[in-house]
Amino acid sequence: MSDTTPDIRLVVLDMAGTTVADGGLVEQAFEAAAAELGVEPGSEDHAGRLAYVRATMGESKISVFRHLFGAEDLARRANTAFEKAYGDLVDAGRVAAVPGAREAIEKLRAAGRTVVLSTGFARVTQDAILAALGWQDLVPLTLCPADAGGRGRPYPDMVLTALLRTKAADDVRQVAVVGDTSYDMLSGVRAGAGVVAGVLTGAHREPELRRAGATHVLDSVAELPGVLG
């Protein structure tokens, strides 16, 4: 740990795009959700909704669909179709770990840090991803928005829930939040995390991550143990 890096005790890691290689699965699953609600592929309406999905990567998916489709019943229909399509892709072997992610998590834990995996997906999808990777026992706690009262990113709720559940840190400044989207960065900033690290293996690039408050930008989560020391 350098003189300028806080004494990090708790690390809250995003999943898709950060520790899990997404490979465009979110957009493919969105196609299924859009089709469920009759959005015509190739239309201007479809393009606009897809652009919003891309811009809000990292947010709770049900929140995204509430914005896109308005009525709660439509949002839930879209979310159910999305989760089913994503789950089918996971079951088909389309998900893989970001190279070096598992090793990075193991190094962080070996150094005495507590690691939590968080996601904007529903619990059923999160569990399917963990099972596909053989990660069910890799960390002591995994969180989805429902575990934190329903609000996902960019709210700080999942980060603060990780702190409250694990009691791994005495101060929010001893928390590191790591993700690939601007909403990941915002959630870390709003939680008061001492390290808010963006990674370039997912949705957003360095300028977006920096604008959202990233204190560090890494090529990959594999670099994180070296940064924290």
Image (tube, helix red, strand yellow):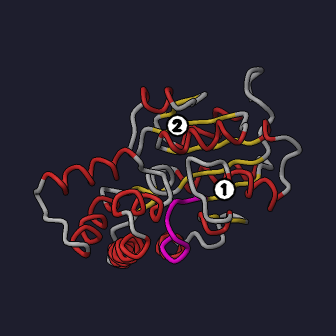
Q: Residue furthest right?
A: 170
Task: Tell me the quarter of the picture where residue 8 sits.
Answer: top right
Q: Residue at x 71, y 38 (%)?
A: 193
For residue 58, side relative to residue 32 (left or right): right
**For the view shown, which residue lies furthest in the front direction?**
71
- Amino acid type, label 1: Met
Task: Say which element carries label 2.
Answer: strand
Q: Which mark is residue 81?
A: none
Q: Position of residue 109 (x, y in %)?
A: 73, 53
Question: Which callout, 1 or 2, points at the residue further toward the start of the chain?
Answer: 1
Is disc 1 surrounded by few (<14), some (14 to 19) or many (20+) residues within 10 Å?
many
Quarter of the view holding residue 147: bottom right
Number of disc labels: 2
> Is 76 included in the stretch rendered in magenta?
no
Identified by mark 2, the residue type is Gly
The residue located at (36%, 73%) in the rendering is 74
* Spot occupied by residue 215 in the image (x, y as percentages of width and height): 61, 28
The one of 229 and 122 positioned closer to us in this rendering: 122
Residue found at the very far left of the displayed protein: 42
Q: Nearer the viewer, residue 37 or 129?
A: 37
Q: Provide the residue designation for mark 2.
A: 198
Residue 119: in magenta span: yes
Determine whether the residue tagged by mark 1 lies in a helix, strand or loop: helix
Q: Which mark is residue 158?
A: 1
**Residue 87 as seen in the image, left or right of residue 126:** left
The residues colored magenta run: 118-125
Q: Quadrant of residue 3?
A: top right
